[in-house]
Each structure stands twice: as C-alpha cells, then as structure tokens.
Image (tube, rainbow, N blue to C red):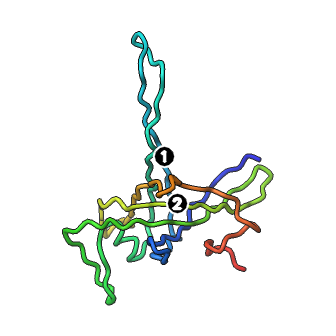
Amino acid sequence: MAFAIKDAIDLTLKTGNDQAYCVINYLNDCQIQLESEQVFATKKGNNAVSFSSGRSGTLTMNAEVIDDDFLCLMLGATKDASGKITVDDKIPSQAFTATGTFRIVNEDGTEELRNITFYKLQAQVSADLTLSATDVSSFSLVLDILADGSGKIMDITKAVGGASVQDPRIEE
C-alpha cells in the first residue's frame, strides 16, 4: 500500500558499547541522503561497463529546540558533570548507532509507525551557530552515515503492534 510521510524521526543515539548517549525527539525535519558513484569502462568512447563504488550518506537534522547533547555534537564539544560545554582543538571521532521511529499515513488513512536503525553514524564537526534577538535560532546537525563492520548501513521496518518503545509520543 502506498503511503505518505509527514513526520521527522525521533532518534536515540548510542555509543559503541550500546550505552544511550542522547534522545533526539524534537526535530522539525530531517533528511537522509545516500549515494554511490558510478565509474565506467568505455568501449569506442561510449560507456560500456559500470562499476559502483561504496555507498556514502548523511543524516541532516534540523531543529529550533535542542539540548546540550545536540549542541555538543554540532560543536564537536564535550560536557562535564557540571554542565560546562568545552570546545577545544581535539576533533571527536565517536561513532554511534541509532534507533528511532517515524509515522506514516497509508492511502486508506490508517497510521503506522516505522522503526529505523542506523548501524554507524559519526557527527560532522562544523557548526553555524547563529544567535539572534529578532528570530528564533535554527540548528542543524549533520551525521555521516557509514557502514558497520558487516557492511550494514540502515534498516527500516514496520513497528510491531503499531508502536515502538523508542517513540515517546505513544503512551502504553
């Protein structure tokens, strides 16, 4: 059945030891971009054989309401126990796994939840932090989507029972 999406992902990022790093459930929009390059062998000047390179991708998350963890990821910063955020000359290389949900609406009007899993994400450390007294600040976090050790990049599945434990909008 065909469906439409009018929702942003709610996502839980976990560190390599499967420890929760942060919950991102306040996005206004997000974009998943996956691509691979094609290289061609030519025959008499025309493309004859195609070779695909490995996949690469990005997950871009945009919000106007954020928390310290989101800000730290944007800035490549650390936060200590007192809440102090520090940016120094060391670029973090922390990789994350992520699980989350988003809502779809089927052509017949029924709603479903879909689970999404990213097997390896790494923040791109470049931030444009605009603070304004006249407009609400917008924040953008870009994560590289990478393949894990087994070559997995991402899964999208139907949520069992229509809801997922990662989805804070659904009350049990």
Residue 50 at x, y percent in the picture:
48, 27
Q: Residue furthest bottom?
A: 82
Q: Write the residue at 26% across / 65% down.
A: 91
Q: Which of 40 and 107 is in front in this view?
A: 40
43 sits to left or right of 8:
left
In this image, 39 relative to 75: left or right? right
Specify few, some or many for label 2: CA neighbours under 10 Å numbering under 14, 14-19, or 20 or more.
many
Vertical arrangement, residue 108 with respect to residue 65, above or below? above
Q: Image quadrant of residue 116?
A: bottom right
Judged from the image, the secondary structure of the residue bearing numbered disc 1 is: strand
Query: Among all residues in the image, which is located at the extreme left?
Result: 89
The label shown at residue 46 is none
Disc 2 from disc 1: Cα separation: 12 Å
Which residue is painted at 42% across and 76% down in the image?
A: 67
Q: Quadrant of the C terminus?
A: bottom right
Q: In this view, does 49 lie above or below 146?
A: above
Which amino acid is tagged 2? Phe
First along the sequence among labels 2 and 1:
1
Residue under numbered circle 2: 118
Q: Where is residue 6 in the image (x, y as percent from the top left)?
A: 62, 56
What percent of the width, then of the height, locates residue 38? 44, 32
Q: Which quadrant would residue 80 be assigned to in this image?
A: bottom left
User: Nearest the camera: 111 or 81?
Assistant: 81
Mark 1 residue type: Leu
Task: Choose between 65 and 93: the one closer to the eye.
Answer: 93
Q: Which of 134 and 45 is in front in this view?
A: 45
Which label was assigned to residue 34?
1
What secondary structure is found at the residue carrying circle 2? strand
Q: Which residue is drawn at 41% across and 59% down?
A: 143
Q: Is residue 96 left or right of residue 159?
A: left
